[in-house]
Structures are given as structure tokens and as C-alpha cells.
Amino acid sequence: MKEFVCIICPKGCRLKIDDDLKVTGNLCPRGIAYARAEITNPVRTITSTVRVKNRQGKLLSIKTSTPAPKEKMFAIIEELNRLQVLAPIKIGNVVLRNILGLNVDIIATKNID
Amino acid sequence: MFDILIIGAGIVGSLLAREIKKYKLSVAVLDKESDVGNVTSMANSAIIHSGYDPLPGTLKAKMNVRGNEMFDELTKQLDVSFGRVGSLTVAIYNEQLPLLDELAARAKENGVKVELLTRAQVLKMEPNITKEVKGALLAPTAGIIDPFNLCVHAMENAVDNGTELFLNEEVIKIDDKGDYFEVKTSKNHVYKAKMVINAAGLYSDKIAELVAPIDWKITPRKGQYFVLDHYKSGLVRHVIFPLPSEKGKGILVTMTTSGNYLVGPSSELVEDREDFSCDLDTLKKIRESSIIMVPDIPFHQTIRCFAGLRASSSRHDFVIETPKGIPNFVNIGGIESPGFVSAPAIAEYVVDEFISKVFALEKNESFNPAVRKYINPKKMRFIDRHKLVKENPDYGEIICNCEKVTLGEVRDVLKRNCPPHTIKAMKKRVRVGFGKCQGTFCLPLVVKELAAFYNISPLEVLYDKEDSNILLEELKEEK
Amino acid sequence: MEVRDLIIIGGGSAGMAAAIQAHEDGIEDILLIEREQQLGGILNQCIHNGFGLTEFKEELTGPEYAERFAKQVTDLNIDVRLGATVLKITRNLEVTCSSKEDGFVVLKANAIVFATGCYERNAGAIQLPGYRPYGIITAGLAQKFLNIEGYLVGKRVVILGSGDIGLIMARRFTLEGAKVLAVVELMPYSNGLNRNIAQCLNDFEIPLYLSHTVSKVEGEGRVEKVTISAVDQKFQFIPGSEIVFECDTLLLSIGLVPNVNLLTDINCLIGPTKGAIVNEQMETMIPGIFTCGNCLHVHDLVDFVSLEGRAAGHGAALYLKRGQIASKHLFKVLAGSDITYVIPSRIDFGVDEDVTLKFRVLRPLKDCYVILKNKEKILKKVYRPVLTPSEMEILKVGKELISTLNSDLILEIEKKGTN
């Protein structure tokens, strides 16, 4: 039996999952999926910033298109530290496809003119 | 080779440098800090005392009274905020009333105008004073000052008139060569001067001993304070003192020239000359003492607590003298309260009593006693401010929202003599970061301005001391 | 003097929502004044996600949420003045404004929405004991330096305060290569969202010390050591419980305070949230001045800020359209047992609309009823399994109930089973 807090939404339900992957404590179905993933393949949405090569002093905020494997978090950040993007950029632009071959894209969350 | 070298750019050193430039003498000032007035001169009650308190006949009394009368002209020339608001020394218990009479008598001896007030008169003047007040001594010549800018503008004026200022220079050795001195600093720089004046504050005894043995020493005496935010309805209009004790003038409550309130200082001897820490017990005692005089002090408006160290001398009076047989070395030590108000008088005294004995004092005809006027948009009439912003849009951009400081003011001080090199130095001059948010909104902008002006990376901008970089690492820089 | 129908002070989430709503309600002449060079307020530096679940049914990052509103403001052609700071407002609704571009001017408004957000409590406010080396900074400032400018303000960090900003920064620092040694919380519980404890602390094995606080800060030019101590129920240090951390930064996440100087300068009445006292129209007690967002009370979710911004914009629009009228009723909404505050705390008009009451409880509670009553009877009773001070609650009161009010209301909590 494992216990943890769901991070899918701000409600933060306290979930319990047993060895048969049966989940209790969730107020919505997303909690079930989250709890199961935490046991089998924990994932996290990563948000960070990258430098904009042709706009001195401006940072672009980004997020992963889908949650990425938790164990790859620091590797992803390191890859992002090497990444430099070019303005103009619009929210939703994919600034890097398939980062580290994980089937996760990096999406711009800010407009940079 | 300088004519005169001053060690210490606090309020005494800065005003002295300026005073000496009224004559045809070359002056250099050394200070170990990154800015002038960076230690005791910036951590005090900012009061221009009237002078009834020091024991008659002491140097403190003499310098206090003479200094006080110089402040109107001085602050006008140096364009510094000064308010002769007057002070009230209050008696809370009936048995304190005779002490007020004693102070009045002392005032008379010192030549200071005071007035004894009844309870009714006190409450009319200051409705927020405790209803238990029995009477008070009004000293109308007491005032409040902007201590940071008095020191800065004094040095700015000194440099305008030819003084050379060397910051970040700590004196470690002084060689007496007879008719001149070689002053060595920790950076291995050597300064030569025919006369040296020691105005080194907390370390004045240490500097004195580099030249000759002395019979006095400095013991730091700490004073902790509360700084309260400015707020509409106001608390007190005068400086409110309790009756003095052997520990000092006691815990006062006062408005500052920026409209804030200061409550403090405490008075405790410490050993470490770098101990500027605050502790909860002492802060609690300050609260308890101060509310006896002014019950409704809004401590929830506290934006900051700080501690200053007084350079108390074992003589319990100012030390302004030359060592025996060395007329070209002057020690100025033990400048604790009433040090700030006395400073211009001390400068005058040192020139008259000591410098005149070493040099022929020839008047410097090109001495300009005034600094270039400062633009303070907050104090301008609407129409003038509107015009100012049209002519110089930098004065339209507000950098610090809490204290309403404009970009124009920030850029102006950078272009003057004795400019700020650090965030703390900028704070002292234009008040960015002194408000209720303590720099949270304005710090990034000020870092940018300093970096741009000095053509350095933002990573090199310091708060104050060498290892106090604001920013530790730049992320994702081009590899 | 330039006259504008509606001036909105602050172009963050509250101000933008107010502008959009007022426009929707038919107010054409709106001026939105913002001191930064872009709209969005604090959202621009909140690059993490968790915003918009209620408002947009999507999970967005701060800048994305802000852009949704900023785009609407632009699309509706609402007049925006950027890089402009309001220095003063008067009871006659004169607004003194200063900017590089437009100069130093006084404008006259027919109504004002005050949406200036909040600022962070800092060391002075809690009389942090010890020395004053450089390196004690607030979490929001560290966030701005990191997410907007791209600089780390510390490499070895102790965080005081387990509110969401501190937790978010714990993760942010760690991801960018700094070491977060501890998060220290005075209370026996954290007031951050559980999900943040999970994804910001647990994920990185950052220890959380509850019922602890900083007892000493040491360092000369820069912070070198931070000592924390356990506290008892009276928040006194427990001797012998000290833990010393060698670090270079003490990050403070110790609370937010509404930014209301311009209101207190004109003696606007302030309530227990440190923001203005308002009625159901979000009008302060100065006629024509409305307020919303973090400068009214500190919110945890920006979605509710937008809701409140719309309420204030709507209130201002009604005010502009019908003019100032005498209050129909004048009832208070009082905070009863276990309620810290309730907004609005006044019902002035009994208008033909629902009213949304927002409140916080005093302490964590389980298995309770939220009760709205007057001296005669219970008007509304809602079950809540969990209530916590760190999460603002909402209670909708229907217009039928509002129109029949005849006395002051009390909002209170009753434990289930107590009758």
C-alpha cells in the first residue's frame, strides 16, 4: 500500500494505491491514472526557461507538451540549458521536438516579439 | 604627497575634508568601506541634538551647541533634508519633574534655549504621548536630518572642491617620518601626507596606536532600532526623549526626514566591533520602554530592524587631540552622541586648533560651499514636475514604487562626485529599497542601472562588501 | 484635465479581468494603467503550471494565463498605458500618474478599479534575529531574477516559510543546479498546496521542518550560516533543538500583504485582510472606488482573482451607468466562529444578482458545515469535508435570499454532530 498526494490539480487528493493497483482517495478519474503512473512510470510536467539567441536579456518560458519521465528531469533541464531559440516566438510554438527521444516536445509559453 | 590625509570618511571625515578645502591645502580621504558614511554615520538616530544634555564644560557640550547652530546654512549649501522640529524630553512620573529642572539648568549653562512645559501643553503639542505625562522639556533647536545624504553631499562637495577620495582602503601601518607620514593600506598602497587626521570611528583607537600610545580606548556600544513605515495620520511631530540615564539619552521615538518613524536605540556594550546583529530580547525591551512614552506605536508597521555601534570612549567625552610632540597627527575619537550634530563644529575646531598650527591657512578663493542642486520630483509643484518630465523623461519613470523614486534621480547620483558603487550606496542616496517592500520590486532595475553605468556584468554588482554579490550565477549563458 | 470614465490601476490578472468585464457591460471609455512594460502582473514570472483549471478548464502556466486576458484586452481595443505608475489618488477620483512616455499628469476618473496586487513580507516584519549579511531575500524577488533575468541569487539555500511561493522556488532552484537544504515552517502544518509539497519537496527529497523557525543568521558580507530551532505551542524557541545549515542564502516566503498605500493615504477603511472593506459590488467605502484581487485579499488561485476582477469591473460598470445611489440596505456580513474573514463584509444594495462570499477558516477543519445565518434563522448550510486556512472558500448566495435580507449576517463553521 503506497500513499501520496495527487499533483494533477490544486485539490491535492491524498491517494492510496495497493499492490493490485487499486486506487482510493481520488475525487476524479485522473487521480487513478496518476497513482498508477507513480508506481509504474512516474512522470512530471517540467516548466523552465531558455535563452532567446537574438533577444539579449530576454528569457522564454517553456513547458513540456506532456509529462516526461521523472527520472529524466535533470537530463531534460541540461538539454534545455543548451537550447537557444530564435524570436519571434508565439505561445504554443514547438521550440524543440522529441527532446532526448522521449516523445515529449518543448512548447513556448510566452510571446517574444 | 598630500598636505592632509584623513583616515575615515564618516560624517566627521567628510565634513572635515570639505572644511579644509576652504583653504589652499591638498586633501585625501581614505576609508576601508565601499562608501562614505557606511558604518556609524548611517546607523544612528539621525537627530540634531539641541545641546542641553552634555555635561557643561565638556567638548561634547561645546561642539554640540556650536554644531547645532551651523545646521541651517550647512544643509542649505549641501541640499540635505533637515527639520528643526524640536525635541520633548518627557517626565512620566512625578519624581522625574525635578530632573527636568536639572536639565533646564544644564541647558542654561550650555547656552541652549529650552522651555519647561506643563502636562496640558505637552498633550496639546503631541496628542499621542501617554496621558500619564507629567511635564516635558521642550528644546526647539533640536532637529532631524537625512544622515546618509549629509555625509554623501559633504564628501561630494569636498571632492567637487578638489579632495581625493579613496574607498576600500584599510589603513594597517603609519610611519612617522617627522615632517610627513607614510600611510600603508592592506592593498599595499602607500599614501604620503604632511599631516594625518584620524577620524576612524570605531577603530579610531587602533589607528591612533599606529602612531603613538594613547590613554583612551573605544568600546562599541550597540543601539538597536525599529524603523516604521510612513503612514498617514502620523505619530509624533517632535523628537520624543525619555529622561536620560547614565546609559545615555534613552529610547526615543521620532519622525525621520523621510516621514518614517524610528524607535530606539537600546544601549548595550559589545566586544565585537563588527557586531551589528539584532536580538529579540533587546527589541522586546525597546518596545516596552517606548510604549511607556507613546502607547500606540504601530509596531505592525515595522519594515526593518537595525543596529548601529557607537564609538564610546573610555573618557566619556570626545577625544580631539594630538599625541605629545606630534603636532601633525590629530586623533578624533569617541564620537558618539552628540557626534552627528557636533561634526561640523569638530571640523571647524580641528582646522582652528590643529591644522592652523601646521600650515599657514590661505583662503581658497575658488571654494564653492554648495553642491549642484538636487532634483527631487516629489517636492516639486505639479506644473514644475510636469515640465521636468517633459524635458527629461527619466524623471517620469518610477523605479521604486514604495518610496516613489524616479530613474532620473538614480541616474543623476551616478554622474556626481562621490557616486554610489554598490546597491547599499545607491539606497542611501535616493532611498530605493528603503520602503515597505525592501527592494523586492526595484532591486533588479537598480542592478541593471549600476551594471550599465560602470560597464560591468550584473554578476559583479555588490550589495556592499566584497563577497556580497547580488547575483551568483548567470544561467544558460552562451557556451 | 483629462477625464476617463473608468480608470483601472494595475494590469495584472485582477485589473485585466475588470477591464474586460466593464467593457462587456458597455463601458467604452476605459484606461488600464500598468507600471511594467507588459500586462500580466506577477503571472509573468510564474512560469510553473497550475493556473486556469476553473477559468479555462485547462492547466496553464502563469504567462499563458496572463496572455489569454492580455489578448482579450488588446482585441477589445481597451486603452492601456504601460510603464506608468500611479502615485496618488484622491477621494474625488483624481489619479496622478507618472511615466516616461506620457509624462507627469493628473487624470480624472468617474470610477476607479484598484487592482495593485500585493508585496512580500520581509525580514523586518518578523524581526529576524541575528546579523544582517547580504543574502536574505524574498522568494518572489528570487523568482523574478531567475525567471525573467536568468540569474541565480543563491547556490545553497534555506527557505523560511512553506507557502506556495517558497515551495515553487525550492523546485526551481533545485532544477537550476542550486542546493535547497531545508524548508522551515513556523506552524505545525504547511499552508502550501499539498501538490506542491509533493512535487517541489518530496520529489527532490528536500526536508520540511514544521514547527521550526530561524533563530540565528550569521555571516559578514554574505550569509554563511542559518540556525533553525523548534518552537513550542507559544512559538518560543525550544532550547537544544538547534540545527545549523551552512548556506549562502536565506529565502523568505513568509506571507503577502495587500498593496494599499494609495488607499490608506486617503483614509479608505481597511479590513482584516489588510485590503479595503468592500460591499457586494466590490466597492470600497469611498464611493466610486472599487477593488479586487490580491490587493483586496491574498488569493491562492488566480482563477478566483479573475472572478473577483470581473465582479469589480461589473460593479464599476453598474455604478457608472446608474450613478451613485443611496444604499438600499446596509447589512454587515460578520465573520463568526472559525472564520478569519469574509468578503464582501457589507451588503449595500440588495441588487438583483447573486453574491459570492469568499472566506477563509482560522484553522484546519474536517467534517463541518458552513453556515450563513442572521439573528433569526439559518439561511444556508453547506457541508464541507475539509477546510484549511491556506485555501480560500466560496459560498454563493442567491439573489432571492439577498433581496429578502433584513438584518446583519453571520458566517460561521459548525462541526458536524454538534447541534
Image (cartoon, rainbow, N blue to C red):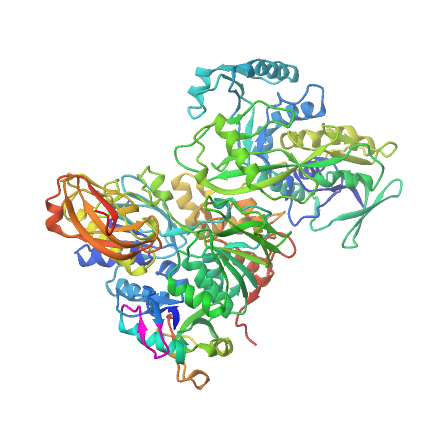
Q: Residue at 42% x, 32% y: name it.
A: B234
Q: Quadrant of the N terminus of chain A?
A: bottom left
Q: Is residue B363 magenta?
A: no
- Return the x and y of residue B149 as percentages of the image width and height: 58, 40
Above or below for C409 versus A85: above
Chief secondary structure of the magenta portion: loop
Image side of residue C301 versus residue A84, left or right: left
Q: Nearer the viewer, residue C230 or A106?
A: C230
- Return the x and y of residue B23 as percentages of the image width and height: 73, 35
Q: Is residue A22 magenta?
A: yes
Q: Nearer the viewer, residue B194 or B244?
A: B244
Q: Residue at 63% x, 41% y: name it.
A: B157
Above or below for B14 versus C218: above
Q: Nearer the viewer, residue B402 or B252?
A: B252
Q: Residue at 46% x, 67% y: name it.
A: C202
For the record, the magenta segment spans A17-27
